[in-house]
Structure formats: structure tokens, C-alpha cells
Amino acid sequence: MDSILDTAAFGTFAGSGARAGTAAPPSGPGLVRSLKAELQDASAPIEAAFLTVGETLSQTLDHMAVIGDRFLALSALIDSEDGVAASSRLGKVREVTDRLATDLRQTLDDLTGLDASGADMAALLAGLSRIIGEITALAINAKVQSVQIRSGSDDFSVFNREIDRLHRLAEEATTQAIAHLAALRDAISAAKGGAALFQRDNRTRLDDVGRRLQGSLDTLASHRNTAQQAARRFAGRAAEVGQRIARCISDLQVGDLTCQRLSHIAAALDVLELLTHPPRPSALPQDRRWLAELDDRRRTDLSAAICALQIRQYEEANSDFGGQVASLKANLEALVRDADAITREAADLFGGSSRGEPGPANAAVKGTGGSVLADVAGEVDRALDLLHHYCRSDDVLRERVVEVSHGFDAMDRDVRAIRSIDTDMRLMGLNTTLKCTRLGTEGRGLGVVAQELRACSRRTEDVSKAITEAIQSATRRANALDRRSDTDHRAAIELAEEMTNSMELLNRLQADQTRSLSVLSGDCREVSRLLTGTIDRLAIGRRLEASTRRFVEQVEAVSKIGEIHAPGIADDLHRLFAALYTAERERTTHAHLFGGESLPDGGDQGGDIDEFFL
């Protein structure tokens, strides 16, 4: 049956050619104007919304370019001048801590050896003291023997005075040497005990310092590798984001395309209005005058065909629009996830708080920010605390080592004094022996005493030589210990300064990282905010869907569309609309509804909008 139009709604077609029992073309221009207004209301927000989406995508592109630069800059911070210098300084620090730990054992060994040397010297000085005691008895006996000599030519009073003086000097020098040795042995014992305690406490600390520094170096190396990998991964992510934005831009084409399709439907409604109230042929454009020449039945069939075609075009436009908007929304939501993922990844790599926000600017001091650099700085800071304790303990040990070294110097002076006295005593004994030989029997007793005195002198010389050799050996060891202790002491101080400088570099690097991360996170949040707000505007899809339902309901309500068999209707539709279509989708819909695979291209009328954008 031919298409029948609802005369109640459209009115009857004026003219005597209408067949009985069939409806006339619509005569109600109010409905057409209402439908066109509906089309305008549906089209207007699409253009505004998609303009906003386009602006948002443009801003997103700018932000993502900046985000990419910041992420790569963050990844490269560890390889910056500060990062390389911090790693280099920590590597040198580790070498020094290992040497200090080794020297601690050597220091204790040296002090143990010096303690043993002190015990040997104490035994030698005890022997020397016994010899000095023998000299005391010989001095008294010499006085007795010299008094018994009656020779007037030889005066032994000088001998008596000299032996008293030399004996007193020897006794004083020996007593002083014994006292110095006792003090020296106390100093060695204190230094040895201090070194043992120092080694027990600080060897562990130095090992801990070394362990922490090695861990920090390993962490920095791992972080450098992780940052480089992240930069490479980000390049892939950036490509994905670029492709996603490109898909969004492609999806945006549906906005203009849909507006054009709605405008084409409005143009078709204008033709429908002409069929409902045809003006005089002279009032129509040249290419539309043939409409005024149609008979009533032809008008009715053509009107019904136009209604069916525009319903299908509207439904197809709505379907295509809904699909593309869903794709656009999915891509925009994916971009939001991308921005959030970049924030999380950057926070995980360079920040550290559970919320993905960068830590405070001073987090590097104790590692409270949770970032790798903050953790490393915290480890270095704790190692620095241990090193400061080492330096304070080393100050005490250094004083004791210096005291031991000076003690051996004092001992050496004492022994030289004893040897000088011994030389004088030996010469005095020799002179006395010669005088007594000239006296014959009368000088025999004093001569024996003089010979004993010389024998004691030789024994004193042997003991003093042994003491001198022991002192020289111990002094060499003490001086080596002193030099090494001084070197280690200065190295520890320099080490503390080096670690302090490393801390400054790490803190500066952490501050740079925190600032960059904060800005990057802000950019990502801004992208998320822009995109989220834009996604909310895509609710226009529901509005177009509602408009489509109303259009279909109104048109179907006033036109009872059935099978359209009138010959030539398809040709009339082609003649009316073929040049109007700008999208292949419109031509395909038209062809599927009224036969044929496709319509001729509109030529210069606009071409395929898809081809234009692509």
C-alpha cells in the first residue's frame, strides 16, 4: 500500500487531484517549523561542546609535552652534576672508611707491641738501677780507701766529690727514666685500652658506615638504572598518549559531521514544507520548480518517502554520533588514567608518599619523604653521625698516641743522660786506677774499687745501649703510629667534611627533584581536571538521543509510512538530496533505503568529511 499521511496533523492537500481514501501531503507548517527548531536545539550544543573538547585537547597536548619534558628531566636528575658528584664523593668516602677500619687493627697491634717494649725496658731499667746501687756501695768504699792513703802528692778528694756527684746524677737520671717509663707505660696501657675500646666500638661503626655508604652507592646506581628505564618506558607511554589524542581528534569529527547531517535533515524538512504548501512555480528556485508540477498522489508518496528517509537519517546520525562519542569518552577517560598513571609512576620513582604526592622539601634530611634520594641522604646522614662519633673518640686516642710518642722522646733523653754520666764515670775510674798503680801497695785497695767502678760502668753501658736500642725501635714504631694516627685523624675529619658536602649535594638534588615532581604532579592534575570536566560535557549524546526519539515519534505520528512502490520516487529523492550529502554515511543510508549501492558523489558540494579530516 502507498504511504498515507495523517491528515489530522498535516491537513489535506489543496487540489482536486487527491484520491479518495488517501491522505494528502502535510499542510501544517507549524509542525515542520517545530521539527526544524528541534534540530537546531539538538545541533547547537554539539558545536559548543566539541569546541570545548577541542580546546581541552589542545591544552592537553601542551600539558603532555611539558609533562614529558619534566618526566625526562626528573629521570635525568640523577645523572646531573650534583648526582654524579654525590656518587663520586660517596665512592671515595667508602674507600677511606675501609682504610680506617684496617688501620684500627694496626693501631691496636702497634700499641700492644709498644706495651711489650715498655715491659722490656722496665726490666732493663731495673737492672740499671741495681747497677747504680752497686755504684753507691763502691762510692762509699772508695771514700774509705782514699782516706787510708797517706801520699801527699795525690789528692783523692776530687775523686770522692766526683764519684758522689756522678753517682747522684746517675741515680737521679735512672730514677727519672724509671718514672718516665712508668708514666709512659701507663700512657701506653691507657692508649691500648682506649684503642681496644675504640676498635670494638668504632670498627663496628666504621663497618656500618661502610655498609651504609655501599648500600647508598648501590641504591644510587639502581636508581640511575631505574630512572633510565623509566625514561625509555615513558617514551613508549608518550607515543601511546599521542595516539590516543589523535584518536580523540578523529572522534571529534563526528561533531561537525553530525551537525551537517542535522542541517541536511532540516533542508529535507524545507522540501517537505514545499510539498505541503507548494508556492507558485515562479517563486521556487529553478531546480525546485518541478515540485510544483507534481500531482497530489505524487506529492503524497514523495512526502512519505522524505519522512521515512529523514527518520532513518536521524536515527543513523544519532547512532553514529553515540558510537563516536562513546569512543571519544573512552579515549578521554584513558587520557585521565594516563595522567594519573604518570603522576603515580613519577611519585613512586622520585617521590614516595603513599598518596603519590611528593614529600616535603626538607625530607632529604632524614629520609622522611620516602624517595630514593631522601633514603640515601638519610643513610648518609646516619653514617655521618657514626663518623662524628668516630672522630670524637679518635680525638682522645690521638692525644694518647701523641703522649706515648712524646714519652719515648723523654725516655731517650734520660738514657742519653745516663750514658753521658757513665762515660764520665768510666774516665774517672780509669784515672783513679792509674794513680793507684803508681802508689803500689798503698793504693791497691782503692785501685780495686776503681776497677769495680769501671766494670760497673761497662755493665751500665751495655744496659743503656740495650735500652737505647729498645727506645729507638719503640720510637720508630711510635712515630709510625703517630704519623698514621695523624693521617687517619685528618682523613676522618676530611671524610666528615666530604660526607657533609655529599649531604648538601643530595639535599640539593632532592630539593630539585621535589620541586620538579610537584610541578609535574600539578600538570598531571590539571590535565585530569580539564579532561574530567570535558567528559561531563559529553552528556550531549543523551540529549541527541532524546531529540531523535521525539523527532521519530512526531514524524511517525503524522505519517503512516508503509511500503513505497510509486515508480520514480527514488529518482526524485536522488534529484532532491544527492548533491546535498557531504558524508558517505548519508549516501549509503539513502541508497539502502531506496535501492542501489550508492549515490553519486556530491562533487564540489563538500565531499566526504571523513576524507577531509583524514
Image: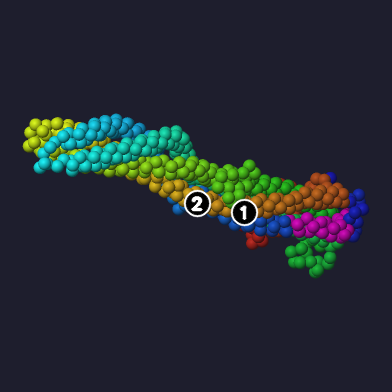
Which stretch is magenta? 23-46
**Residue 560 visible to an observer of this rendering:** yes
Residue 72 shows up from this direction: no
Question: At which x and y percent is residue 26?
Answer: 87, 56
Report which quarter residue 62 is drawn in: bottom right
Does residue 419 appear to the left or right of 577 in the view shown? left
Tell me the SS state at disc 1. Answer: helix
Quarter holding the C terminus is bottom right
The secondary element bearing badge 2 is classed as helix
Q: Nearer the viewer, mark 1 or mark 2?
A: 2
Q: Nearer the viewer, residue 598 or 365?
A: 365
Q: Is residue 42 magenta?
A: yes
Check disc 1 and give the amino acid type: Asp
Closer to the camera in the image, 545 or 557: 545
The main secondary structure of the magenta stretch is helix
Nearer the observer, 323 or 405: 405
Q: Is residue 345 magenta?
A: no
Q: Is residue 106 above or below residue 611?
A: above
Tag on residue 523?
A: 1
Residue at 39% in and 41% down: 400
Mark-to-mark CA distance, 1 and 2: 28 Å
- The disc labelled 2 sits on which kind of residue? Glu
